[in-house]
Image (cartoon, rainbow, N blue to C red):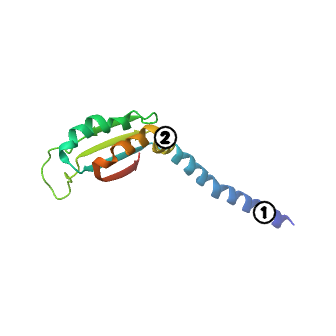
Amino acid sequence: MKSRREFIKTIGVASASAVLPLNTIASTMANQKMIHQVYFWLHDASNTHEFLTEAVPMLGRCPTVAKFIAGTPAPTAERDVVDHSFHVACTIFFDSLEDQDAYQKEPLHLEFIEKYSSMWKTVKVYDIAI
């Protein structure tokens, strides 16, 4: 009888140990800071200034955005690994994945997409956990 109790106790401890890291990881990921990088290729390059100064700043005004930076390709040397083909990029910092999720549903973000999506032919997003 004692060995059965020991077995059940061991299984219980092992089960709890197996679940604890998953809970810890899930909790950490929910509070994980992140960077959301968005690159835009416009239909008409002559709209770059308007898009950079009027459209993209809307994204920086969303309430869950911790920090916002926007710009155009830097005039760095041509190299095989450098992509200068985009017209405008923005980098948005979030304090958590939850903040980024809320940003995706934020009315100002949705308004930006509705109002300005006709200006871009391609958009690429790169999300980075930090």
**Residue found farthest to the right:** 1
Q: Nearer the viewer, residue 119 or 2?
A: 119
Q: Nearer the viewer, residue 99 or 32?
A: 99
Q: Amino acid at mark 2?
A: Asp
Q: Circle 1: is it few (<14), some (14-19), or many (20+) Cα within 10 Å?
A: few
Circle 2 sits in a helix, a strand or a loop, which is it? helix
Q: Is residue 7 visible?
A: yes
Q: Quadrant of residue 83?
A: bottom left
Q: Residue 73: percent from the left, percent from the top? A: 20, 45
Which part of the image, by quadrant, shows the N terminus? Answer: bottom right
Say above or below: 57 vs 82.
above
Q: Residue 16: percent from the left, percent from the top? A: 68, 55
Tell me the residue that label 2 is attached to: 99
Q: What number of labels is visible?
A: 2
Q: Is residue 93 left or right of residue 53?
A: right
Q: Quadrant of residue 47?
A: top left
Circle 1 sits in a helix, a strand or a loop, which is it? helix
Residue drawn 28% across the image and 39% down it: 70
Tell me the residue that label 1 is attached to: 8
Residue drawn 21% across the image and 42% down it: 48
Q: Residue 29: percent from the left, percent from the top? A: 51, 48
Q: Amino acid at mark 1?
A: Ile
